[in-house]
Amino acid sequence: MDQPVKITIDNLTKVFYKKNNSVTAIQNITLNVEEGEFVCIVGPSGCGKTTLLRILAGLEQPSSGTFSIESDTDFRPLQSMVFQEKGVIPWMTVEENVAFGLKMRHLPKEYVRKQTNYYLKKVGLTKFSKLYPKELSGGMKQRISIARAFANDPEILLMDEPFAALDEQNKFILQEELLSIWSETKKTVIFITHSIDEALLLSDRIVLMSAHPGEIVEEIKVPLPRPRTMEQVRANLEMAEQFIAIWNHLQQEVQKSRK
Amino acid sequence: MHEEKEGELYNPYETEQQEWKKRQIKERGKQLLTIISPIFILLLWEICSRTGVLDIRFFPPPSAIVSTFFELMTSGLLWTHISVSLYRIAAGFLLGVIPGIIIGLLMGLYAPIRHFISPIVMAFMPIPTLALLPIIIILFGIGDFSKVVTIAGSVFFPVVINTVAGVLNIEKVHLDVAKNYGASPTDFFLKIAFPGALPVMLEGIQMGQAIALLTIVAAEMMGATSGIGYLIWTSYKAFMLKEMFVGLILISFFGFMFSLLLRGLQRKIVPWR
């Protein structure tokens, strides 16, 4: 691909230090992500993939190394994160949750309203805009989280296993909805998951990580044409082989980390 | 569709309907018990005093207490006591709750403030404010203000402690959301910290309200010339027990009303719970 580089991650290392022992969560992570690319980071739990994302999200400081996100405008925030289901704020209505990022940036009311309504409609929550999250199902809550991030119109989107807590059917539906919103905006996305299926469906490129220390061990391109559906991914033989290759790798990693 | 026949034994819908009806009746029974219990106690009291099981000098029948209540009301004396006490409770409550919330929020949000103030709160909390009443009277005299200060002092602690707990109990992911979406300190305070701490804070206020009532009566017994506590104490000393019981029942009534009021308020301001 010949897109310009959007995210440059250079030699990031994060060590968590406690009395008498330290854990290297990620080690020497170097990665470039192109403009408009959808990258999934897959690895066994405890491999530091969430730590990497939290550093990019500004929620954690790296111990060493740097990263940068390209931006040619002051208007957009650099990044917004799609949190897991619990990231929806219970004391705000659906609408207020979706508008949260825009309101925090104190943008003109008219723009906030338009942007919020647009994404509420996109995720099918217009009817529920005045309700509180407690009245909604897990899938609906996750839609709020997605709408909130897209409405903020950031340079890049970071997603931390957003569908991990959903049941399988809801997960499929939300994955396809995410793809449809994404294809419209062509945002650069880094998406964390432990689901191989999910990574194959969503991403242009899969980055495999190992655990203890968390390092990048392999990068796999996913050449399947878009728009994609779960059925296509399941029916594609090449994808089935990829699945097994990734599984073999992860299996080794999981076994290794159990010793 | 299922067929409904006369005398069919195993109709699942009917069986469930019967079950549901039984549950409804049980629920209603429980509600009834809640209403019956105070009436039962009053009735028992009435009968026992009238038949001489209870000494009428110490336990006048409720009917006599009610008529005393109306006598006192028409003389206007009772109304003075009630309004004075209510004023003291309201003023003391506000004077305790507002600083309690502000200091609690500051302690919850800023660790250095928390670590500095915590030991002071811990040191003062175990001292009953009533034990400080002599000092308070020396400082503020025996007028209304010393009672207000006493109530404020005892309301303050549960509110402070619950507000701190409320802030510390906010889910970490909500703090992350605020940070990730670039909330300014003011926005963070107003949109995340305050509403997030509100439910636990309100529990503290609920506790404070109960303590305020306990305190006012005792404070008015010790150093006052008016108020419901004063009424109870002087009536006792003059052996006017009917008047004393009027005071006691008033306290019970106001306690009940206040907690209903606060619970209603709670439903209004935390509709998301």
Image (cartoon, coloured by chain):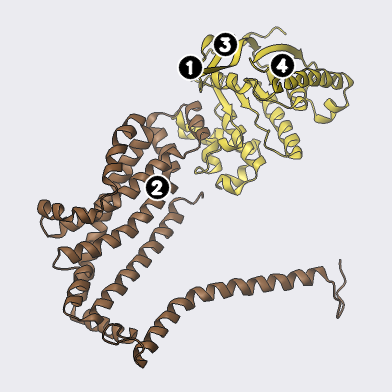
Chain colours: A yellow, B brown
Cα distance in 3D space between marks 1 and 2: 40 Å
- x and y, in percent, of residue B197 in the image: 42, 43
Few, some or many residues within 10 Å of mark 2 (<14, 14–19, 20+): many
Residue type at the position of mark 4: Leu
> Residue at the spot x=17%, y=64% of the render?
B222
Q: Check disc 4 and report the residue beneath it.
A: A208
Residue B226: percent from left, percent from top = 16, 68
Residue A143 position within the rendered picture, expressed as x and y whole percent measured from the top left: 64, 37
Q: How many residues crowd around disc 4 within 10 Å: few (fewer than 14), some, or many (20 or more)?
A: many
Q: Which residue is mark 3?
A: A12
Q: Looking at this view, is A83 or B207 the one in front? A: B207
Q: Secondary structure at mark 1?
A: loop
Q: Is residue A242 above or below residue B29?
A: above
Identified by mark 1, the residue type is Asp
Residue A166 or residue A181, whichever sits in front: A166
Q: Is residue A34 left or right of residue A251?
A: left
Residue B187 appears in view: yes
Q: Amino acid at mark 3?
A: Leu
Q: Earlier in the sequence, mark 4 or mark 1?
A: 1
Q: Would you name the residue on which mark 2 appears?
A: B201
- Decide if residue B33 is on the left or right side of residue B58: right
User: SS at mark 2?
Assistant: helix
Q: Is residue B184 above or below residue A121?
A: above
The residue pinned by badge 1 equals: A74
Helix, strand or loop at label 4? It is strand
| Mark 3 on the same chain as mark 4 | yes
